[in-house]
Image (cartoon, rainbow, N blue to C red):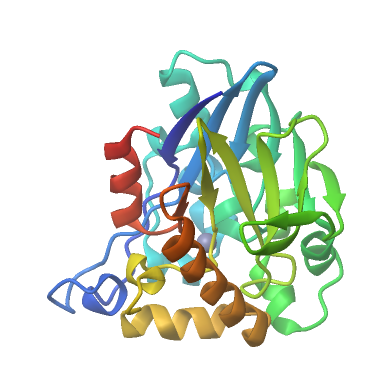
Amino acid sequence: MRIHHLNCGTMRPLGGTLFDGNPGVLRRAEMVCHVLLLETEDGLALIDTGIGTQATSRPNEWLGRSFCLAIAPTRDRAESAVEQIVRLGLDPADVRHIVLTHLDLDHAGGLADFPDAVVHIYSDELDAMQSPRNRAEKERYRPQQFAHGPKFRAYRTEGDPWFGFDAVRELDGLGSDVLIVPLVGHSRGHAGVAVRNGDGWVLSAGDSYFFHGELEAAPSCPPGIAVFETLMQAQRGPRVDNQNRLRTLVAEHGAEVSVFSAHSSTEFSRSLAKGA
Ligand SMILES: [Zn+2]
């Protein structure tokens, strides 16, 4: 298995230091959409999809006007997963599987670029999108992004223990090298996705946290990120518990499991430097 780290949607929220901790508030911070592309013996697989090509051709419709104003997502189609796959000399039609951490617009936006792929997701997350329980769930998902009828394959949270997490399981057709890990809190059925990398693992923690300092022994988090995490959380208790579990994972097994947030540009750069 070969793992590629792709940024499939640079986002630049207003507020500078409030989001990235670097000096200056009157500038835009930089965040990424950290996607994994897996070259398996049985075709290609994506872990999350970024914002997709239609975010560049019709951004207000695809992502929403307020999101575009606040976050200033890239208009560069070259960042889309589908174009990056082509530049790697691979065929987007070979993407057979997509595993999503959740269905928010910056993770599911690229689904429509791969309409034939099987889309693996927790059933609680699919239910939150299809049958929202409250206004927050109704507004966070973009129906346009699912209008093509994704081939969802939904899973209940059940399985085996894995590095301190419970109910971790394999996914149909992806073998034992890709695991879905319940990381509920940011959204109702939010997941982490672990991919075997040689003797260790890479774990996409999605939006379980946003800032690299949050998983350090003495955690730190810029105030804008802290507010955003609270505003967007579906369930506070599980979100905080899972963030604590991730911090313990890094402290106890950081040599075996490399964890990243979907949006940390610092961690994305580290992943590129490590090569996998
Ligand atoms: Zn996100």
Q: Residue at x 60, y 73 (%)?
A: 242
- Residue 14, image x and y in percent? 29, 73
Using the rendered image of the protein, determine whether residue 156 is visible from the camera's viewpoint.
yes
Q: Quadrant of residue 110?
A: top right
Quarter the C terminus occupies: top left
- Residue 218, image x and y in percent? 32, 79
Residue lying at the far top of the rendered structure: 89
Using the rendered image of the protein, determine whether residue 221 is visible from the camera's viewpoint.
no
State left or right for residue 14 relative to residue 59.
left
Is 55 in front, or is 210?
Answer: 210
Is 132 in front, or is 66?
Answer: 132
Is 77 in front, or is 182?
Answer: 182
State left or right for residue 71 relative to residue 81.
left
Q: Residue at x 31, y 80 (%)?
A: 222
State left or right for residue 161 relative to residue 78.
right
- Residue 1, image x and y in percent? 56, 23
- Residue 153, image x and y in percent? 85, 44
Q: In the rendered view, would you say 37 is above or below 60?
A: above
State left or right for residue 189 relative to residue 224.
right
